[in-house]
Image (cartoon, helix red, strand yellow):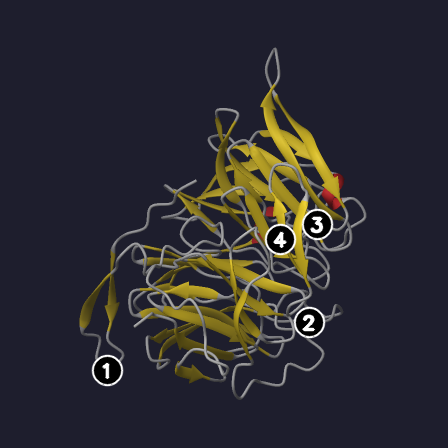
Amino acid sequence: MRHTFAKSIVIASALGGVAAVATLSPAANWAQWRGPLRNGHSAETGLLKSWPADGPPLAWQANELGEGYSTPAVVGDRIFLVGSRGVEDEFVRCIDATGKPLWEQRIGAVGNPKQMPPYPGARSTTTVDGDALYALGSDGDLVRLDAATGKIVWKKQLRNDFGGKPGVWAYSESPLVDGDLVIATPGGDDATIVALDKATGDLVWKTPIAEMEAGYASAVKATLAGRPQYVQFLSKGLVGVDAATGELLWRYDRTAAGSMANIPTPVVQGDYIYSASGKVGGGLVKIVAKEGGGFEAEEVYFESQLPRAIGGSVQVGDYLYGAGGDSVMCVEFLTGDVVWRERSIGACGVCYADGMLYLHGENGDVALVEATPEEYREHGRFTPPNAPDRGKSKAWAYPVVADGKLYIFDWGTLWSFDVTAP
């Protein structure tokens, strides 16, 4: 799957609206959830292969950016985050490449109005597409903003406009932009998944799936068994829908059975899809075209102790890297065989760049690990300085590597570390 993003974006100066053009290289962009291809891979090269004891050099630290678990979208010299204050104010914030604030735009309230579940706060990562920015608030407010100014171009409310039904912990999806469409997941019986015109917000198609709430994962696009599809992990199963019409093509329920929180974004390679949930386990399916028409998800393997943590997994070559409940793991992608397992920093978010795994532990620590099936090889670990007090919450934001920097977000604080090799 590939997404095409504009290679330049016009940004207004915070000092007087003077337009400036930030030219982007493909490696520098991290314009959406899980990176350019939504697979947790950064295209960056020439990065440090080991860190000193106190971590890579800190370029800057910005505080009070808003509560929650958003990851930054990095486009040129601009960084975009979704944050929240209390339960009434969720917003998109734009800062420059030094952490200086440029603009802020409120998009709605924090999800689940009475805040009965624990851990309220912003959850979505923005998607930047040329001069447009798309964000989903945890209460279901889906917006297109002008990336230069933050002005709202259009707004939809997933619960009110589409009869959407989020899970207990509110909406956590990051919008997918594909061609002229924005893909979102209201949940509910009538419009479980929707495609909207990205210019106007008008409905293009909808996928009804009975008794299906939204999960907490984000959709990816893939061509499976010859058919372009959107793959999404919902409250009761993994599904594939036709990219042109929204028709439900197949469904696989085992990795969702008995789970209240289906969070990790599916990992797709060829016709194979890996999905996992924390209380159930992980499994691989192969999507095949059936004789006479239609599609089927054939289970290749399922195992309760495979990578399943909130922080997701990345595939590198023939191997899958991610975390279980308390360990980092390397698994053969096509067989599910565990190659190595190491307690390391425990459950963590993960991304990949230049032969290395960047891990952001739920305890707040950060580690650099070689992406090799030979053995667990750690090349640095540190605790970011002056971390915020997140209370009973955990550091659930994924790490981001873009433009020679490692970005770590944790409950209103964003660190930028220089990881470029001399």
Residue that numbered label 3 is attached to: 306
Of pointers 1 and 2, the one earlier in the residue sequence:
1
Q: Which mark is residue 264?
A: 4
For marks 3 and 4, give the CA distance.
13 Å
Residue that numbered label 1 is attached to: 15
Label 1–label 2 contact, CB within 8 A: no
Of pointers 4 and 1, the one earlier in the residue sequence:
1
Type of the residue with mark 4:
Pro
In the rendered image, the residue lying farthest to the bottom is 386
The residue lying toward the viewer, choosing from 205 and 173, is 173
Viewer-nearest of labels 4 and 1? 4
Of pointers 3 and 4, the one earlier in the residue sequence:
4
Of pointers 2 and 3, the one earlier in the residue sequence:
2
Label 3–label 4 contact, CB within 8 A: no
Q: Dot 2, how many residues are within 10 Å of its Cα: few (below 14), some (14-19), or many (20+)? A: some
Q: Which mark is residue 119?
A: 2
In the rendered image, the residue lying farthest to the front is 374
**Residue 261's image quarter?**
bottom right
Of pointers 4 and 2, the one earlier in the residue sequence:
2
Q: Secondary structure at mark 2?
A: loop
In the rendered image, the residue lying farthest to the top is 292
Location of the N terminus by quadrant is top left
At x 71%, y 51%, the residue is: 277
Camera sees residue 64: yes
**Residue 77's image quarter?**
bottom left
